[in-house]
Amino acid sequence: MKTLVSKAVAIIRAGWLGLAGQALTFIAMFAPLVWARFDQLSYLLVSSAGATVLAYTVTLAFSSLYPRVADRGEMTTALRTSLMVLLASSLALMAAASLILLWAPDVARTVMGWGVMTLFQGFYLMCMGIAVRESNYAAIPVARLIYGAILASLTIAACFFGGPVWSLVAATCLAYLLGSLYIAHVMRVQILQVFTGVDVEERPSAWRYFRSASAAGLSQALNGTASQLSVLILPGLGVFHDVWTAILRLVGGFGTVSQQLVAPALDIELSTLVRSGRFERVGGLLRKELVIGAVVALGATILAGGYFLVTPALDVLGRRQVITVSICMVLYAFGVLGTSVMFNSLILVGGDRYRVLWAGVKSLAILGIVVLGGSYKLVASVAVEVAFAIFYAALVFWCSSRAAARPRRVAAPSEMGLLGDGLNLTHGQETAAPRRALV
């Protein structure tokens, strides 16, 4: 327990800049509402919904897969292939939007938004994956601060002065770009060595890597689809609509903090254990992730409880309905946030195909709730989230146990990463983190 507390304190001390960046992101989220720029906000929401699914998919789940790669040749292939697929997919969407512009301008505008945002968000995710692989956590909160500062300032300017409908999309893309460039600058030596430092005969083919990464990429697409389908439940919630919309936003904000700031520090440690074959220690780390996820969920629950005390959205509900939505709120927070820091864990321990199964069945379950309807949509959707959170955690532990039971080749020190495998929480990004013993 003492180790867990000290780890949490270390993450908070190293990640406070990222928390500041997330606060600025919240300001950017509310600015269009204050100035009633609903046309700009609508285009941003549609564009980001598609890009969120596509960015993880067309990078071949790079941010989840790359940290577990031990072989230098495969690192080069992974980086080049994922970047190539990202560029090709984004440019294809933009070209398609240009071709249909004259016949279907509204559709073209949506597809263009997907293409542009996928490019910049995908680049940001790739840079995050590189920082995790090279154990450089210190770069991630700073990049998040840059992202939040740029997004807040440009969003406020676009809302205050007015502008075209794509203003908020442009602001978001520029924020992703500058955050990515910071990480790329900090990691420039390591990126250049991986990108150019391995001979062709020493690395697998791009097609071979594409096939091996396709399951992880598909799982990310299905998981993103499930997340977007969850929003479609809102129109059928009746009197619960307003209060549950606020709960989704609140839990979503905590989920972003968990996945963007807390999870990378734990992913660094988990991927280090995976690359070195020390699966006997993975179970303990996974249990710590569950505890940290529960703490994040508890924080969201407390904040949501405070919201319940002041919101007028509960005035239209009867006593039993208030009890129902309160119980659903607690279960939903723990279901979604309890495993939020384990977002990459199933792929990191090698459960790519099982994640496809999990995400696919979850998508079908949520789609069934949306299509079939009924008066129990809220309860049913929360039950699905809780059940699949438990299912996901069980899969992570099971895949970890299976991997531990298999004989594995222990990675050589030269394969363990260009910066070593220590968790670098300082701002000395150019300094190699201390190596850990492999046994």
Image: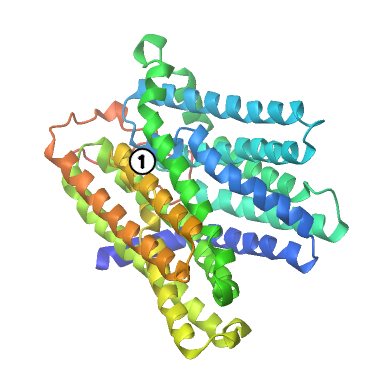
- Whether residue 127 is situated above or below residue 304 in the rendered picture: above
Where residue 368 appears, x then y in whole percent?
44, 55
**Position of residue 146 in the picture relative to residue 250 (left or right):** right
Which quarter of the figure has residue 198? top left
Which quarter of the figure has residue 382? bottom left
Q: Which of 78 and 219 is in front in this view?
A: 219
Count of numbered circles on the image? 1
Q: Mark 1 points at which residue?
A: 356
Where residue 196 appears, x then y in whole percent?
48, 18
At label 1, the amino acid type is Val
Residue at 46% x, 78% y: name it.
Answer: 325
- Whether residue 412 is situated above or below residue 372 in the rendered picture: above
Q: Which of 267 and 242 is in front in this view?
A: 242
Q: Which of 76 and 400 is in front in this view?
A: 400
Where residue 64 appears, x then y in whole percent?
40, 40
Residue 377 visible here: yes
Residue at 40% x, 30% y: name it.
Answer: 214
